Image: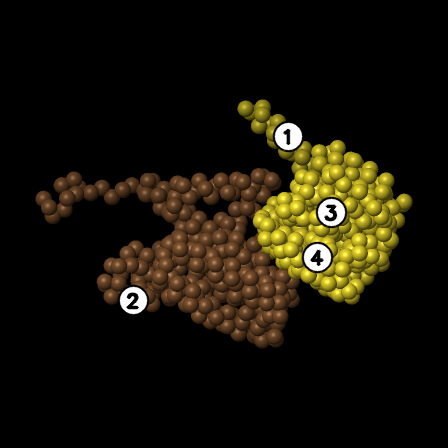
Amino acid sequence: MSRKHILFAAIALLLLIFVPMGQKNYIIYVLTSWLMFSIAAMGLNLTLGYAGQISLAQASFMGIGAYITALVTLAGYHWVLGWIAAMGATFVIGLLLGYPALRVQHHFLAFVTLAFNTLVFLVLRNEEWLTGGSHGLVGMPRPDFFGISTGKNLEFYYFVLVLFVISALVFSWIVHSPWGRAFKALRENPVRAESLGVDTRRITLLAFAIGSAFGGGAGAIMTPLVQFIEPGSFGLIHSLKILLMVVVGGAGFYYGPMLGAAVVILLPELLRFTEGYYLMIYAAMVIVLMVYSPGGLIGLGHKIMARVRPKKEVRKDMAKGAQL
Amino acid sequence: MIRKLAMTTVASMALTSTAAMADVVIADVAELSGAGAAAGAVWHDGVKMAVEEINAAGGILGEKIDLKEYDSQTDPQNSRAMVQKAIDDGAYVLLGTVYSSSTVVNMLVAQQNGVPQITGSESPTITAKGNPYIFRTAFGAQKGLPKLVSYLKDGIGAKKIAVVWANTEFGKGGYDAFMKIAAEQGLEIVADVPTEQAQVDFASDVAKVKGSGADAIFVYLTEEESARFLIEADKQGVELPLAGDTVLVSQKVIDLAGGAANGAFGHVGLSAEAPVDAIKEMAGKFQAKYGYGADHNAIKGYIGAYVIKYVTEQIGEFNQEKFAETMHGLCLDAATHPGVLMDVCWDDTGEMSRESFLVEVVDNAQQISKTLPAN
């Protein structure tokens, strides 16, 4: 990791610490929900952006994580137990969902994951004895840590910020590790990756499992954040929303999902002054972005920088290198 | 160009200064987009009309209402964020949301902050949670459905019923209430068909209830889905009586179903066609102002805004805690409080009672067949 990278991350972290101070509850709530969705989108970025496996089931993993955490905390256990259980369960389920990915690719895989999302939604809604059905689960407490409460919105924000930083560090470690390079190799050329000794089978399953565990972790945050969960919050439309975050921000870029989540959550807020038109403007902006920059906002930034920044001038006689 | 700019600046300054003079902030959090827009947008128009009237008549305790609108996008989590925002913006009382699945989420925030909330939701669970800040503008399904079940049993002599319901917070609440009452009254349920929110194709659902051997069909869906169901039932030539509550025979559904709603009947808490002069007058003004007919949601929103005025004037100050305390057990009569349109009372849970009506759809309009006493 370069020194520039670390400096940028440090400044961003300082901003995240100071920005919510003195803000109203609503702003803090929106920021917390942005951090939470960033974690979910980070997971999908690993599966989709780095490993190239499309998944339309991220919201269902959030749902599984949220319900497990809710059931654990409602039973009187500490949130941390719920969190571990949520991430563990989603890791295993993600691993299982990864198996079809070994056989089907691209849009077929999208349909497999889409079906999985619908399945989870139906289970959450119909198994009333466990999940409360359409009425959902309500009244989950916010956790205490060594006597420090996270009950107030600002306290809860810092709690989520800590989890966000942990997730971001883990994510950074993964993508910069040999695994991360194996994920990219899988995305770029699976045949070549395999010929170089990468176990593509294991890597595909891992991409799904780790990505899903991030989703489960985000779900574990949603439970005490909203303090009410119902199946409708984890439907297909929400998986598409997380996919939009990854794609708008820039799939395969480290900061892509964080930027994307910010755009998807905050932009409708900024456009709210246009009243009835904001959803139309928002939708049009997404279409324009996708047409001009399939690499998302970070891809767009790279494009602009490449134009503005003076190019390294190669000596004409050296252009062809050793051929001369 | 400069002139234009100057004009715009002056105009916007004038606008902001009027907003600054308006003192009491009332927030309307409603389904202005998404699957619930057919209900939320109408509710919001009802609220707006009442607020304009109240402001024209001098406001509340001499202060003008600054009505702020928030779009929940029919998303429970977003509605929670919007309620938080409304409270941050200094809302004195909250109006909305209409969809029960949103209200059960956002009412927690209003409760935590001690802000009274007047909702248009009808799910029985809303007032069963012991929240002292929630108040209804229309009674919950558990109050209306016994009247409908008695009518199905005694009025049309039905013994076997097919039930079509929306598998959402709203639908599940009504469904549970209906099944309980139907069992008590000895009605047999021969088909039980749950449906999805925003479902488009009802062909198989209609076929199922058609072949179930039922004497009548009970339909408990939200606006757009009700209309789609009615259209499909019409297409498949279903001759059975179609019964529902407020939504099935609401003006919005009648408009959307375009003729297919004729013959449907239901028990209605509020209707623009009710034989009540105040409601007819309100509905006339609404039609003239917005160019479409008022339905129960418009009336609920209208009443909600007036309730804020009357209760505040009764306590003589803008005090949220006193507001909630006063509303528990309060009765407002329409003679001295014309904005509530009909005599109305609230109990200790925020549940309300009022006269109601049996309605049949004839020639694309509601026809009141009977007025039922408050319970």
Image quadrant containing the N terminus of chain B: top right
Evaluate whether label 1 is on the same chain as label 4.
yes
Looking at the rendered structure, the kind of residue marked 4 is Ala
SS of the residue under disc 1: helix
Chain drawn brown in the picture? A
User: Mark 3 is on which residue type?
Assistant: Ala
The x, y position of residue A275, in whole percent, is 60, 40
* Residue situated furthest right in the rendering: B335
**Separation of residues labelled 3 and 2 (CA atoms):** 64 Å
Quick check: can you spot residue A276? yes
Q: Chain of mark 4?
A: B
| Residue closest to the far left | A324
Q: Are marks 1 and 3 on the same chain?
A: yes
Q: Colour of chain B?
A: yellow
Name the residue rendered at 32%, 43% in the picture.
A306
**Residue topped by disc 1:** B10
- Between B210 and B98, which is closer to the camera in this rendering? B210
How many numbered circles does the render carry? 4
Say which quadrant the C terminus of chain B sits in: bottom right
Mark 1 vs mark 4, CA separation in Å? 67 Å
Chain for numbered disc 2: A
Kindly identify which numbered label has been placed on residue A199.
2
Quarter-wise, where is residue A44 in the image?
bottom left
Residue B344 seen: no
